[in-house]
Image (cartoon, helix red, strand yellow):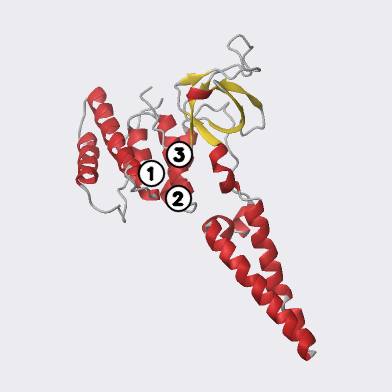
């Protein structure tokens, strides 16, 4: 994988403005990260960044989950040249905060380090940009907003009918449309299926046409660490997954770490 330079660090890896409650482990992780920046010998620098990554990951396991913490975990993993762990951490950051600017920027950069032949998830389209609230509001907030809009639409419609006020009755159409949009966003919410999303954590894994080590490879190249997949079927010890291109095939279950699991990416 390409070397990660100090200039890149300046663009990608600032520490969170709003860190979790100060803990000795957080302070130690930050100090370890800073020490790695000043380490010139490559193997020692990578090992030190890996230590910082473990500390940030441990904080998440202790209940300090936040988008900023996951971004720092990803930055440490990226500096340790562990691309799979970095992509996983940035994806987990976006589960906490879908609009997190550093997570979005760093994930895009990390994806750019993957081989060109690997299909990548499509960026947000015009429709996603227009309906920004689809990702900027949590499911609970959208559910509450939908309930309020439904109540308002019913109230306006009932009042318009009761008092014979056509304009008031017609006004109920607006909150009614907003209610419908919110309900559809809850039904078709990609975040609701985050438990089916995963990242290849093994250094390389062969994608196969069937759930057998004897089956032919589905692609000319093994999937690299950092490839993002969607799980379609579980047949231990195999998973049938779909790539961003729509191609589906089988790979070993232990080669993928799911976004919503508490698993850490092991050393590769």
**Residue for point 38% across, 44% down:** 70
Residue 118 locus on image (x, y percent) = 57, 28
- Asked if residue 155 can be seen in this view, the reply is yes
Disc number for residue 96 = 2
Q: Nearer the viewer, mark 1 or mark 3?
A: 1
Q: Nearer the viewer, residue 260 or 173?
A: 260
67, above or below 43, in the image = below
Query: Where in the figure is residue 24, as x and y percent of width and height?
Result: 19, 45
Disc 3, SS:
helix
How far separated are the C-alphas under marks 3 and 2? 19 Å
Q: Which residue is mark 3?
A: 109
Disc nearer the start of the sequence (1/2): 1
Q: Quadrant of the C terminus?
A: top left
Q: Residue at x 58, y 20 (%)?
A: 207
Point out residue 87 in the picture as x, y percentages from the top left corner: 45, 36
| Mark 1 and mark 2: Cα distance apart in space | 9 Å
Q: Which mark is residue 70?
A: 1
**Does 28 sit left or right of 139 as displayed?**
left
Q: Residue at x 40, y 49 (%)?
A: 67
| Viewer-closest of 104 and 185 | 185
Quadrant of the snapshot with the N terminus:
top left
Check whether the beta carbons of the residues at disc 3 and disc 2 lie within 8 A of each other: no
Distance in Å between CA atoms under marks 1 and 3: 16 Å
The percent position of residue 152, horizontal first and vertical second, equals 65, 76
Secondary structure, mark 2, is helix
Q: Is residue 113 above or below residue 99?
A: above
**Quick check: can you spot residue 127?**
no
Label whose residue precedes the other's in the sequence (1 or 3) = 1
Q: Residue at horizontal 48%, vertical 20%?
A: 204
Which residue is outermost to the bottom? 163
Q: Vertical placement of 46 versus 61: above or below? A: above
């Amino acid at each position: 994988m390409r070397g990660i330079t100090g200039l890149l660090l300046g663009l990608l890896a600032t520490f969170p403005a709003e860190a979790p409650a100060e803990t000795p482990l957080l302070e130690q992780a930050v100090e370890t990260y800073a020490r790695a920046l000043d380490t010139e010998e490559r193997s020692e620098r990578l090992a030190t960044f890996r230590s910082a990554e473990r500390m940030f990951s441990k904080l998440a396991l202790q209940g300090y989950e936040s988008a900023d913490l996951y971004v720092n975990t990803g930055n440490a993993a990226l500096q340790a040249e562990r691309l799979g762990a970095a992509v996983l951490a940035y994806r987990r950051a976006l589960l906490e905060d879908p609009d997190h600017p550093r997570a979005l920027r760093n994930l895009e950069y990390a994806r750019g380090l993957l081989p060109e032949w690997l299909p990548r998830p499509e960026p947000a389209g015009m429709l996603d940009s227009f309906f920004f609230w689809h990702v900027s509001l949590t499911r609970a907030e959208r559910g509450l907003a939908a309930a309020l809009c439904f109540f308002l639409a019913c109230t306006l419609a009932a009042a318009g009918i009761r008092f014979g006020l056509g304009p008031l009755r017609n006004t109920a159409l607006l909150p009614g449309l907003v209610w419908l949009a919110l309900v559809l966003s809850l039904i078709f919410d990609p975040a609701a299926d985050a438990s089916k999303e995963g990242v290849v954590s093994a250094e390389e894994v062969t994608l196969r046409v069937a759930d057998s080590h004897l089956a032919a490879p589905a692609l000319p190249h093994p999937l690299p660490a950092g490839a993002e997949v969607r799980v379609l079927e579980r047949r231990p010890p195999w998973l049938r997954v779909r790539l961003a291109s729509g191609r589906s095939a089988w790979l070993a279950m232990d080669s993928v770490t799911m976004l919503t699991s508490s698993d850490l990416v092991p050393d590769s």
